[in-house]
Amino acid sequence: MKLSTRGKYGLYAMIFLAQHEGEGPQSLKAFSALGTPEAYLEQLLGTLRRADLVKSVRGAQGGYQLSRDPSQITARNIIEAMEGPLNFSDCVSEPEHACNRSVNCPAKGVWEYLTGQVNGLLDGITLEDMVENNLSSDRR
C-alpha cells in the first residue's frame, strides 16, 4: 500500500492549514512552501472542501481554512477524502466484486484484520497530533 502524490499533498495541505489555524484564510500563494503547483493544489483543496474538511472564503482576503478544529479531523478523514476508503482487499470493501474464493478464503480474515487495524490507527491520529508532532511509536 502506497499513498499517491494526491494523498501526500492533501495531508501536507491540511497540516499547513492547521499550523495557520486562527490566522484567517490562507491564499493559494501562501501554500508555496509545499512546492505544489497552484492549479494542482486548487484541485486538491477542492476535493478537501467537498469532503467538508476545508472551506473556501472568497474575496481579496479569501483563501482556504479548516472547516473544523484540528482535533476533530483525523488522518483517516484526510486520506480517505484524497484516496478513497482504505481496504487491503476487494473482499473486505466490495464482497460482491471479490474473487470467487472469497467465501472460503483463508486469507480473508487477515485482510479484514489489517484493514480494521490500519483504519483504527488512522482514526486515532488527529490533525492536532500531527501539528504538535505528538506521534510517538508507542501510541496505542
Image: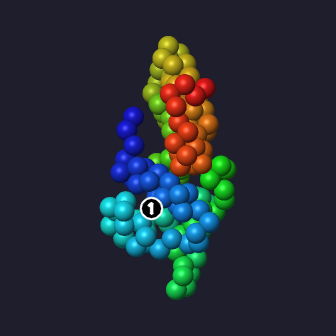
- Residue 23 location, x and y as percent? 58, 69
Residue furthest to the bottom in view is 60
Crowd around label 1: few <14 · some 14–19 · many ≥20 (10 Å): many
Task: Tell me if I can see residue 93 in this picture.
Answer: no
The answer to which image quadrant residue 117 occupies is: top right
- Residue 2 location, x and y as percent? 37, 38
Residue underneath mark 1: 44
Task: Tell me if I can see residue 23 in this picture.
Answer: yes
- Residue 104 location, x and y as percent? 53, 16
| Residue at horizontal 35 percent and vertical 51 percent from the top | 5
The type of residue carrying mark 1 is Leu
- Residue 77 location, x and y as percent? 58, 48
Residue furthest to the top in view is 106
Residue 56 horizontal side relative to residue 28, left or right? right
* Front position in the image: 76 or 127: 127
The answer to which image quadrant residue 49 occupies is: bottom right
Question: Considering only vertical position in the picture, is 114 above or below 76?
Answer: above
| Residue at horizontal 43 percent and vertical 70 percent from the top | 30
Question: How many tags in the picture?
Answer: 1
Element carrying mark 1: helix
Question: Considering only vertical position in the picture, is 18 above or below 108?
Answer: below
* Front position in the image: 118 or 134: 134
Quadrant of the image for the N terminus?
top left
